[in-house]
Image (cartoon, grey):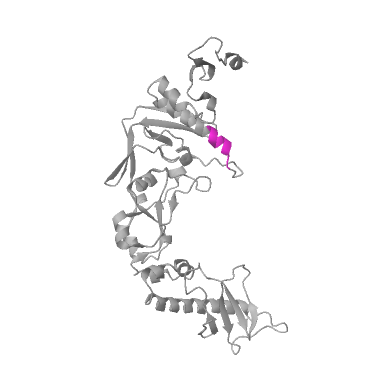
Amino acid sequence: MSFVDTEIGAIYLHGMDQPNGAQYEFDVYLQGLPIYTPHSYTSHRHIIHLDSSRFHARLPDRDKLVDEADVIKRIKAVLAQTIEQRFIRMKATVSAEAFVGFYEMLRHWELLKLLNDVHVVPPEALREIIAYPVCDTEVFDNFEQRPEKAMTRAEIMARGIVSIDDDIKQNGAGRYLFAWNRDYLLYHGTLDKGHWLHSLVRHLNDEELVIETVNESHQAQFQGDWCWVGVRFCEAYRIRLGQDVVEITGEACYQGQENADDIIMPKGDCSAQVLQQMASFRSEYDEFQESTFESDSDAFVAFVVANTASDPANAMQRLLPNFCGCPALYGKAFVVELDQQGKPASVTAFPVQSGQTQTLEAGMSS
């Protein structure tokens, strides 16, 4: 171990050779004996050997420091100063990419200002939208992820970077869908206020959001077990922020409880994924109601088909399940009759052959 002499004694800094988290724990020794250690399970700790001429143990057990709280406060201050000095020297000798790799440690020790003039941004400060935005990433899939590596100023400027301060359930998904469509980076809000990146960030919540439908056909009310919501069916919709407009045809958008509280459903989206924007399907005990989510999703798909199918045969084709698990049905044809509630009333093999008629009429009426 290589120790640094300081005003309080000798300090060994752990985790300065390569990034390995925040590195905030430390063990304190006096006259070679342990006298202070935090109650944590990490084995990654800085080591401090106190100067025995300046610090003293409490008698008779000598297992605690005299004025421990004040001493620990002083230790933390000197430790932070020592870490800062080490990082300043490191910054002059390693690559920018290697230096920003210590982001977590710099953040914990309030040293993010050292990144202000570094030409790359640590991935921890950035996010990419990689999937359809949803209101609850603990229940549904996460739609954001860190970039794989640090990014240069040129790379960030080429893509653009924005900040979004919306709760999707409350404020809607419009700004997130806009950013996803444009492939913008998201600023994660963690750098020092003097960092150069702030001058590049476009704050979308400072701009008026306008969503316009294109060739809207009609509106209908979806009534599920959990979700009740108005749905506007259209060819596409446009999201306008400032002078920029994106047109979306393939993903539905929930506008949020504090806005129109409805769903805009373009022709290219026949799924129920938009329900994941308007509800988390959590009970009053914070438990995910999976069966209710699945039943509402199935009902919503049927609802979309009913409102967008070009003819009854098209609707039937889109609503039929996959029969790949039943080889006996492969290559067969059937005549299906539905009752007034849309439930199967009878199913007959086609063409009908003598002695081979298969009907479900008796089963349906029982």
Label count reads 0
Q: Residue furthest bottom?
A: 53
Is 231 contained in the magenta span?
Answer: no
Q: Which residue is drawn at the image coordinates 61% and 88% (left, top)? A: 52
Picture coordinates of residue 236 (x, y %)?
33, 35
**Stretch of the chain drawn in magenta:** 288-295
Is 299 rendered above or below residue 125? above
Picture coordinates of residue 145 (x, y %)?
44, 53
Magenta region, mostly helix, strand or loop?
A: helix
Is 294 contained in the magenta span?
Answer: yes
Is 239 rendered above or below residue 215? below
Picture coordinates of residue 205 (x, y %)?
37, 50
Quadrant of residue 305 in the image? Answer: top left
Q: Is residue 212 visible?
A: no
Q: Is residue 140 visible?
A: yes
Give 219 or 134, whichever is nearer the viewer: 134
Q: Residue furthest top?
A: 354
Q: Which residue is drawn at the image coordinates 33% and 30% (left, top)? A: 216
Give 304 or 64, whichever is nearer the viewer: 304
Name the quarter where the C terminus is drawn: top right
